């Protein structure tokens, strides 16, 4: 099975089975699974909303989630078959989460999925630790490993060297 590293601001969508992994702090990964067609896709966004300035990109949740849904539909899924899994949104940076980016990312993901009528069947969000996510696109299974803030920085540094 092929593997794929999902960088921040990226979306992975393919009917071909993959193992997709990513590292999350305050960022969110939304995985969409189609249990009928037996495949899934995943995104990794950093900030909740694009403010309308510059170029819209998948680093913003309000861009990345609709794009992820559109990719699933383009690959043949029916929207009513889609199920979501949401991960990340920790407050790993500023003391006391001064900007509350993780919390705002979680709220946006849940709000948009509810608006799109896509049920969230599992989630692992919030807290102060980062997460390593391993997503099996053929089954929709997700493995989550908690990562302390110092380990999170080391993992991000190492992944950027690759």
Image: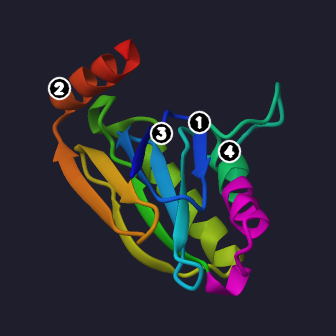
Do tag 2 and tag 1 residues touch (Cβ < 8 Å)?
Answer: no
Q: Which residue is mark 4?
A: 49
Q: Which residue is drawn at the image coordinates 24% and 31% (left, top)?
A: 152
Q: Nearer the viewer, mark 2 or mark 3?
A: 3
Q: Position of residue 146 (x, y in %)?
A: 19, 48
Q: Please report whichever mark, 1 or 4, sits nearer to the chain's N-terminal start.
A: 1
Decide which of tag 4 and tag 3 comes sooner along the chain: 3
* Real-space Cα separation, disc 2 to disc 1, in angstroms: 22 Å
- Above or below, 142 against 56 in this view is below
Between the C-alphas of marks 1 and 3, the distance is 8 Å
Q: Which residues are magenta?
A: 66-81
Residue at 38% across, 57% down: 135
Q: Badge 3: few (under 14), some or many (20 or more) residues near its Cα, within 10 Å?
A: some
Q: Is residue 19 magenta?
A: no
Is label 3 in a helix, a strand or a loop?
loop
Outermost residue on the top side: it is: 161
For the residues labelled 2 and 4, the Cα–Cα distance comes to: 27 Å
Q: Position of residue 88 (x, y in %)?
A: 38, 51
Label number found at residue 150: 2
Mark 2 vs mark 1: which is more N-terminal? Answer: 1
Q: Secondary structure at mark 2?
A: helix
Q: Which residue occupies the foreground of this view, 98 or 73?
A: 73
115 is higher (above) or lower (below) than 25:
below
Q: Which residue is mark 1?
A: 9
Which callout, 1 or 3, points to the residue nearer the camera?
Answer: 3
* Rendered residue at 26%/59% (across/down): 143
Q: Which mark is residue 6?
A: 3
């Amino acid at each position: 099975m092929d593997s794929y590293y999902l960088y921040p601001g990226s979306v992975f969508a393919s009917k071909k089975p993959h193992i997709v992994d990513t590292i999350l702090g305050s960022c969110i990964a939304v995985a969409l699974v189609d249990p009928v067609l037996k495949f899934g896709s995943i995104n990794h966004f950093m900030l909740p909303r694009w403010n309308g300035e510059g170029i819209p990109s998948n680093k913003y949740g309000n861009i990345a989630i609709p794009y992820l849904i559109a990719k699933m539909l383009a690959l043949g899924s029916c929207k009513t078959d889609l199920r979501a899994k949401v991960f990340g949104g920790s407050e790993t940076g500023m003391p006391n989460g001064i900007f509350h980016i993780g919390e705002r990312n979680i709220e946006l993901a849940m709000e948009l999925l509810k608006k799109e009528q896509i049920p969230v069947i599992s989630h692992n969000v919030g807290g102060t630790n980062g997460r390593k996510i391993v997503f099996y696109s053929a089954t929709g299974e997700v493995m989550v490993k908690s990562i302390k803030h110092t380990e999170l920085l080391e993992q991000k540094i190492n992944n950027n060297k690759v």
